[in-house]
Amino acid sequence: MEQKIVANYEAAKELYARHGIDVDAVLTKLAEVKISMHCWQGDDVRGFLNKDQALTGGISVTGNYPGAASTPEELRSDLEKAFSLIPGKHKLNLHAIYADTDEKVELDKIEPKHFQKWVDWAKAQGLGLDFNPTCFSHEKSSDGFTLSHPDPAIREFWIDHCKASRRIGAYFGEQLGQTCVTNVWIPDGFKDVPADRLTPRKRLKDALDQVFEEELNPAHNLDAVESKLFGIGSEAYVVGSHEFYMGYGIQNNKLVCLDAGHFHPTEVISNKLSAMSLFTDGILLHVSRPMRWDSDHVVTMDDELIDIGRELVRGDLLDITHIGLDFFDGSINRVAAWVIGTRNTIKALMRAMLDPIEALRQAELEGDYTTRLALTEEFKSYPFGAVWDYYCAKNGVPVREEWLAEVKTYENEVLLKRGQVQIGAN
Ligand code: RNT
Ligand code: ZN
C-alpha cells in the first residue's frame, strides 16, 4: 500500500483515538455490512423477460446514455466491473424480469431453474442474492392494478407470481448460504380520488395472506413489503400505503421496506428507523434520492444519507436492517452510477461509526446541547477521507476517484461498442 495512505491513516487514527474511537475496530465492523446492489440500474429497469414491454408501474427512467446492458452476460460483466470498484463483499438484488433463460416463461410460472445462471455466477463471485417479484411492465398490470385487482383471475396471476418469487428467493438463500430478502412492491393505485379506498386494501390484504401462506425457512428467505405514497398515475391513492404495510408487516412478521423516495418530500426514513425497530424484527431499506418527487436519483453523500447511517449505527440496527439500493439514472454511465451510490452508502456508514457517539450522548443527557452541536459540526471536517482511502486500498479497490479512470476505460472498450438500445421509451 502507498506510504502516504498509511501515514494519513495513522494520523487520522490518532485524532479519532483522542475521542475514544477505535478506527481499526470500525473498519472491521464496516467490512461485515453488506449492501444489496440493485441489478436494475444497469439497464434502466428493462430486464430480459418481456423486453418489448415499456417500463410501467408509475416509475420512470430518463436519459439515453450509451452502453446499457441488454443481455444477462452484459449485465453481469457490468456488475463485475462495478463490484470490483467497491470495497467489501456484498449482495446483488434481482428482479423477476431478469430471469436468464431461453424459455418463454410467464411470470406466474417462473422457477429457480430460470435463475440458475445467476446463482452459479453469485457463487463464483462470493455474492449473496436478493429478489423481487416484478408486478409492473406487463400487460396484466396495464390498468394499474395487480395484487389488489378487482378481477380475481388477474389477482390470481399476480399472487402466483409472488408465490413463485418467494420460492426462488428460498432457493437463492439455500444455495448461497445467505438469507435472501424477497421484497414485494406493487404499483396499484388511482390517478384520481377514489370512491372506495377500503375495498382494494382488503383485496390486497387477502392476496398477501395467500402469497405468504407457504412457510419457508427464514434462514433461506425473508419476506418484505414496500409501501409508497404516490406514483406517476397513482397520485391520488396507493393501495399499499405506509400505514397499510406497517400494519401488515408488524401483524404478520414481515420486514417493512422503507424507500427513501416514498414519503412526503420533507419526511425522512432516517427518523423512522428507531421507532420501527421497537416493533419489528427486521427492516429493509431502499436507499434512494428523491428530488422533488420519487425520482430515484443516484445516492449522494447528502444529509439524509448521513442520517440513515447515524441511525443504523447509533441504534445498533445494522444486524436487523437489510440495506438495499434503489435508484435508476439513464443519463450517466450506469456502472459509475452503481459505484457512486454504493461507495457513498458504505462511506456514510463508516462516517457514522467514526462519530464521537458516547460524548454526544453524554452531552445530550446533561442538557449540554452546545457541546452536542459543536462536536457534531467539528467532526464534519475530521479526516474520515483518510480512513476511507485506507479502507479502499486495504480491500484492493481504487482509492478516491481513481475508480473513474477504470470506468472510462471500460466505457471505451466495452460499453461504447454495444449497439444502442431504445430504453425507457417514456
Ligand atoms: C418503486 C419501488 C420499487 C422499484 C423497484 C424496481 O417505486 O421503489 O422498489 O423501484 O422494484
Ligand atoms: Zn423501492
Image (tube, grey):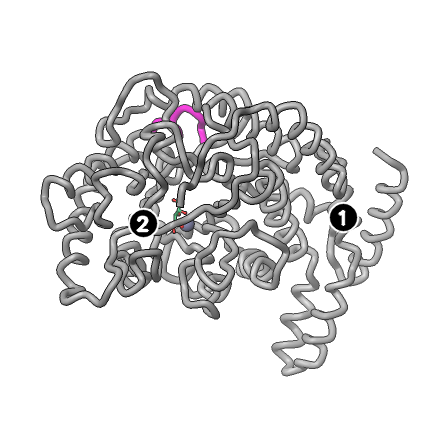
Cα separation between marks 1 and 2 = 37 Å
Q: Residue at x 48, y 32 (%)?
A: 128
| Residue 372: x %, y % from top left | 68, 75
Circle 2 residue:
254
Image: 6 above or below 280: above
Position of 16 compared to 95: left or right?
right
Image: 271 above or below 202: below
Task: Give the residue at the far left of this rendering.
Answer: 152
Task: First in sequence, mark 1 or 2: give its number.
Answer: 2
Q: Residue at x 54, y 26 (%)?
A: 126
Q: Amino acid at mark 1?
A: Val
State the image quarter where residue 54 is shown.
Answer: top left
Disc 1: CA contacts within 10 A as few (<14), some (14-19) or many (>=20): many
> Is residue 323 visible to us here?
no
Disc 2: CA contacts within 10 A as few (<14), some (14-19) or many (>=20): many
Q: The N terminus appears in which quarter of the rendering?
A: top right
Position of 314 compared to 121: left or right?
right
Mark 1 vs 2: CB contact within 8 A: no
Please tell me the numbered disc located at residue 387: 1
| SS under mark 1 | helix
Q: Amino acid at mark 2?
A: Lys
Q: Residue at x 71, y 36 (%)?
A: 403
Position of 110 compared to 425: left or right?
left
> Is residue 274 visible to us here?
yes
Please tell me the numbered disc located at residue 406: none
| Residue 289: x %, y % from top left | 52, 56
Residues in magenta, as a range: 171-178
